[in-house]
Amino acid sequence: MLDIRNFDHIGIRISNREASVTFYEMLGFELIADGGYDKGHPLVMLHPSGININLLGPATAKAGANILMDEAEKYPGITHLAVKVKDAEATEAFVTEKGITITGRREFRGTKTIFIRDPDRNVLELVGPGPSVAQLIAEHVHN
C-alpha cells in the first residue's frame, strides 16, 4: 500500500483568469503565486482550510463547457471537487447572497449537500456536517 497522507493540490483548467480568480477569492481562496498562467503553468490559490487549488490555463477549447459533466458521452476524468463545510444552511445562504447558482442538491440522513459551478462549469459539491459521503453511500448500498 502507498503511504498517502492527504491531497496536496487539485488542478483545474480554466479559460478566463480574472473570472476564475474572482470566483475562488469569493469562496475564500487567496492567490499566492502565478507560476506562469499564460504559458500553461498554475495560478496557486490557497484556502485557510489548507485546500490548495492550481488554476491552469488558458483553456484552448470549449470555454465555458464541462465535457465531463455536460455532454452525453461520458469521458474519463475528475467530475467534481467535494468539500466539507461547517454549516450547510450558512453555506447555502452565502452562495445565494453571492449570486452563485445552486445547480443541484441532495439530503441523505440529515447530511445536506449543494452543488455549484465555477465560471468554467467545473462542479463543486459543498457537503454539510454529518457522516462522510463515503459512509452514507456504503451504508445505503449495504442496507
Image: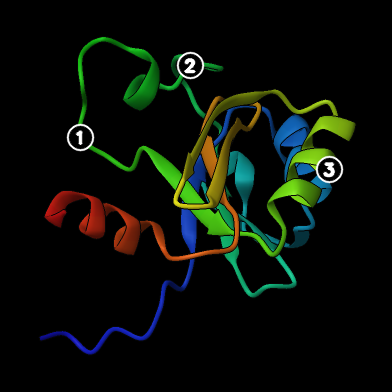
| Amino acid type, mark 1 | Pro
Q: State which tag comes first along the sequence, 3 or 2.
A: 2
Q: Secondary structure at mark 1?
A: loop
Query: Which residue is at the far bottom?
Result: 3
In the picture, residue 16 is in which quadrant? Answer: top right
As rendered, which of 88 and 66 lies closer to the eye?
88
- Camera sees residue 98: no
Q: Secondary structure at mark 3?
A: helix
| Amino acid type, mark 3 | Phe
Q: Dot 2 corresponds to which residue?
A: 65
Q: Dot 1 corresponds to which residue?
A: 76
Query: Which residue is at the far right?
Result: 97
**In the shown orientation, is residue 45 left or right of residue 104?**
right
Q: State which tag comes first along the sequence, 2 or 1.
A: 2
Q: Residue at x 70, y 23 (%)?
A: 101
Q: State which tag comes first along the sequence, 1 or 3.
A: 1
In the picture, residue 105 is in which quadrant? Answer: top right
- The quadrant of the image that shows the N terminus is bottom left
Q: Residue at x 68, y 73 (%)?
A: 49
